[in-house]
Image (cartoon, rainbow, N blue to C red):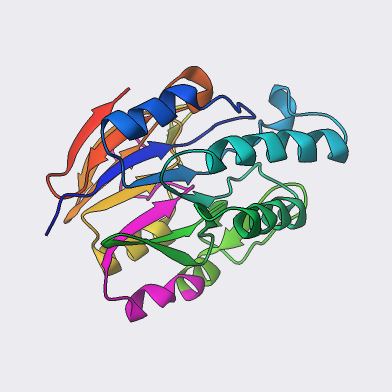
């Protein structure tokens, strides 16, 4: 089993300069880049603007990601809304390039890893919202990534919403906000590594899984992960 190297991003917030990431991908022989949501900034944090403005910003972000020299697997974040706009842009970018893949309720294969993901906020009730923000009931997330049962490759799971059993990775404004459904999915498939879009940069062990929150790329943060050794470098 060869060691797979992962570069994890989250909370890009409209930033489209990935030159440093591209150089890191080349120098460290990264196999796959994961993006755990946060493609666009929150509307209350400079993300206001017309639909045309947000579409143009999203296209710049996706174009920059598509230029990276390895497979890129993306899920949308809670504020990457409306769903129609974001998923349409992801699908169009996926068609236009060979390296960028939307894994929101889907998967892609990168060498020896199958990357399976789900974006947005994963709720522990039946609430669902896909216009002003992306929120999904836990049962929908579990149903849509059950494709993992059919895959022969080792799994790499990617979620925007952290798991509920986190020590710090799910903390927002001093409160734990993790999803019990995400906890259940990580516990069911037990990957060596799961990437989440927590607001706090860090790493934690949950069961058999190293859970990594890469931090905010808009502030220059990301993570490099050795999947086999479960060694994490936080940048």
Residue 163 spot, x, y in % from top left = 37, 50
* Residue 6: quadrant of the picture: top left
Query: Is residue 215 found inside the magenta-colored segment of the image?
Result: no
Nearer the observer, 2 or 139: 2
Residue at x-position 65% and y-position 41%: 79
Residue 34 spot, x, y in % from top left = 42, 45
Residue range corresponding to the magenta coloring: 143-169
Residue 77 spot, x, y in % from top left = 58, 45
Residue 18 spot, x, y in % from top left = 51, 27
Query: Is residue 152 found inside the magenta-colored segment of the image?
Result: yes
**Quadrant including the C terminus:** top left
**Quadrant including the N terminus:** bottom left
Q: Is residue 131 left or right of residue 185?
A: right
Residue 170 in sight from this viewpoint: no
Give the vertical position of 119 relative to 153 (above or below). above
Nearer the observer, 28 or 165: 28
Q: Is residue 180 left or right of residue 85?
A: left
Q: Is residue 65 left or right of residue 176?
A: right
Number of numbered markers: 0
Residue at x-position 68% and y-position 34%: 60
Q: Residue furthest bottom?
A: 150
Residue at x-position 29% and y-position 26%: 234
Nearer the observer, 228 or 158: 228
Give the vertical position of 196 relative to 220 (above or below). below
């Amino acid at each position: 089993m060869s060691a797979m190297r992962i570069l994890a991003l989250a909370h890009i917030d409209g930033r489209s300069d990935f030159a440093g990431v591209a150089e890191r991908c080349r120098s460290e022989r990264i196999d796959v880049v994961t993006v755990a949501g946060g493609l666009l900034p929150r509307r209350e944090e400079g993300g206001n603007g017309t639909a045309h403005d947000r579409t143009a910003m999203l296209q710049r972000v996706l174009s920059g990601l598509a230029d990276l020299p390895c497979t890129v697997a993306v899920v949308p974040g809670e504020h990457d809304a409306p769903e129609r706009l974001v998923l349409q842009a992801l699908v169009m970018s996926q068609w236009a390039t060979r390296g960028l893949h939307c894994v929101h309720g889907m998967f892609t294969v990168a060498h020896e890893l199958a990357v399976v993901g789900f974006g947005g906020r994963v709720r522990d009730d039946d609430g669902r919202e896909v216009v002003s923000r992306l929120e999904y009931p836990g049962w929908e997330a579990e149903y849509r990534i059950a494709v993992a049962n059919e895959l022969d490759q080792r799994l790499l799971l990617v979620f925007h919403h952290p798991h509920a059993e986190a020590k710090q990775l799910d903390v927002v404004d001093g409160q734990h906000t993790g999803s019990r459904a995400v906890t259940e999915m990580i516990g069911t498939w037990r990957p060596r590594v799961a990437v989440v879009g927590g607001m706090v940069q860090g790493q934690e062990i949950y069961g058999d899984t190293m859970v990594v929150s890469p931090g905010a790329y808009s502030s220059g943060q990301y993570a490099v992960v050795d999947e086999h050794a479960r060694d994490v470098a936080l940048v």
